[in-house]
Amino acid sequence: MLGFDSFELLIIAVVAMVVVGPKDLPRVMRGVGRWVGKARGFARHFRTGFDAMVREAELEEMEKKWRAENERIMRQYPQTPPASTETDWGKAPPAGDPPPQPGVEGPAAPAQPSAQAIAPPRAPRSPALAYVPRAPRAPSSTELP
């Protein structure tokens, strides 16, 4: 920002007091403070907008680089078709196997584990939360029966 030394600020304050007067100086300083605040807000808004534009331009540039690199890699390593997922169910059984039963599509699916077997074990309760009954208190010698 502006480079003012303390001596320069002192001269400005003395000139302002002579020109404006001590009575109106607080009101004038309040107005100057408002103008400075508005100028800072405008500069901050401008800087934020400018930074956002620069960030968007950098992102677009990076996307172009990534797209070009991705295309180069895809040309260098073309995709192969996935492996065949055909099962042996539609084929004729080998000579030694019994014929398939009617209404059965294929081998039975393995049994699914129960929900209890999948769920993680529950954590033990905190001892602070557990209820612990107290033993009855014996009367002290200072208490009256």
Image (cartoon, rainbow, N blue to C red):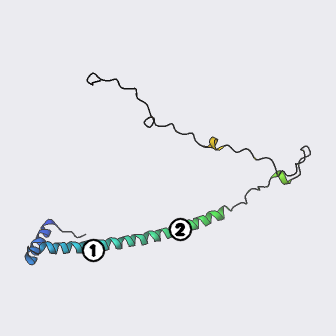
Most extreme residue toward the right is 95
Position of the C terminus by quadrant: top left
142 with respect to 137 (left or right): left
Q: Residue at x 86, y 53 (%)?
A: 91
Find residue 20 and report its image quarter. bottom left
Q: Looking at the rendered structure, which numbered label has been put on residue 39? A: 1
**Pick the front one: 25 or 55:** 25
89 sits left or right of 42 in the view: right
Residue at the (40%, 29%) spot, across then down: 134
- Answer above or below: position of 89 versus 139: below
Residue toward you, 23 or 134? 134
Up/down of 102 relative to 41, above or below: above
* Amino acid type of the residue that numbered disc 2 sits on in the rendered structure: Glu
Who comes first in sequence, dot 2 or dot 1? 1
Q: Residues within 10 Å of mark 2 (few under 14, many from 20)?
A: few
Q: Report the residue that reaches farthest toward the front.
A: 145
Q: Is residue 120 above or below residue 89?
A: above
Q: Residue at the location (65% across, 62% down)?
A: 76
**In the picture provided, is 104 more to the left or to the right than 11?**
right
Question: Between marks 2 and 1, how big is the CA–CA gap?
Answer: 36 Å
> Seen from this angle, which residue lies furthest top?
141
Determine which residue is flagged by label 2. 63
Comparing labels 2 and 1, the label whose residue is closer to the camera: 1
Mark 1 crowdedness (10 Å alpha carbons): few <14, some 14-19, many ≥20: few
Q: Image quadrant for the N terminus? A: bottom left
Q: Residue at x 43, y 72 (%)?
A: 53
Where residue 116 appears, x then y in whole percent? Answer: 63, 41
Residue type at the position of mark 1: Ala
Instruction: In the rendered view, tell whether residue 139 sits above or below residue 76.
Output: above
Measuring from the top left, give residue 85's x and y in whole percent.
Answer: 76, 55
